[in-house]
Image (cartoon, coloured by chain):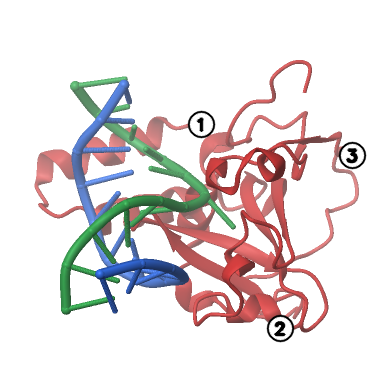
Chain colours: A red, B blue, C green
Amino acid sequence: VGRIVELEAYIGGDDAASHARFGRTARNAVMFGPPGIAYVYLVYGMYDCLNIVTEPDGDPAALLVRAVEPLEGVEAMRTARLERALARRRRRDAAGDARLSERLDALPAARLAAGPGLVAAAFGLDRDDTGRDLCDPRSPIRLEHVPPGERPATVRAMPRIGIGYAGAAWAERPWRLVDGASRSLSVPVRSGS
DNA sequence: GCAAGGATATCG
DNA sequence: GATATCCTTGCA
């Protein structure tokens, strides 16, 4: 269980940073479907990224989940992270495996899912999870309301990350939303933003 | 500061 | 069918 503390909005086919910018394709098909559905894609050939489809059927849009603050199951997340890291290695050797394990053990819980690729790794998600209904209480991966008693989010908006290819006009839009008080952000909030 | 890594969309 | 590029990460 974790609390989403960082999201980026990708809205409509005219958003030059969105996967929907080329229209409907095999990869992005669920973005054009109903909201509340998971869209998981592979980026840079290595990392899976979880998105939540948002707009009504026919209107392509999604939220990229860039960071989650662990609330429960920290050790399960650590195990999932290690499993993913080990599976990715070409040449396996005991010394290297042990070193990876040590590094993960030393990683603070708050940093286990502090990045889009790390969110999927910590929750054991991959592209096969595309299409899951995140609003279905029976779904193994799902959205729930923040438990009562948790601190309220102090939401801040700033430009999205890693989308220089879309051009300045789109890159400047403040469509990255973070809980400024969280220590689990992928990139720390810079003062003034 | 940069290499790793494979799918993807586009171009010949 | 080939290739430039990609909503990143963890190492040097």
Query: Judging from the image, what secondary structure is the residue with disc 3 in?
Result: loop
Residue under label 2, please give it: A33
- Direction top: furthest residue: A191
2 or 3: mark nearer the eye: 2
Residue under label 3, please give it: A152
Residue drawn at the location 57% of the way across and 44% of the way down? A163
Residue drawn at the location 64% of the way across and 56% of the way down? A16
Specify whether A114 is left or right of A57.
left
Q: In whole angstroms, how far apart are the C-alphas of marks 2 and 3?
A: 31 Å
Q: Mark on residue A149?
A: none
Specify whether A152 is left or right of C10.
right
| Subunit bearing disc 3 | A
| Subunit bearing disc 2 | A
Q: Mark on residue A108?
A: 1
Mark 2 residue type: Gly
Are both tags, 2 and 1, on one chain? yes
Query: Judging from the image, what secondary structure is the residue with disc 2 in?
Result: loop
The spot of residue A58 in percent (x, y) is 76, 83
The spot of residue A29 in percent (x, y) is 59, 81
The spot of residue A63 in percent (x, y) is 70, 59
Mark 3 residue type: Pro
Query: Judging from the image, what secondary structure is the residue with disc 1 in?
Result: loop
Q: Nearer the viewer, residue A162 or A142?
A: A162
Label 1: how many residues lie within 10 Å, few (<14), some (14-19) or many (20+)? few
State yes or no: discs 2 and 3 in contact (Cβ < 8 Å): no
Mark 1 residue type: Pro
| Subunit bearing disc 1 | A
Q: Which quarter of the figure is the C terminus of chain A placed in? A: top right
2 or 1: mark nearer the eye: 2
Residue drawn at the location 60% of the way across and 40% of the way down? A161
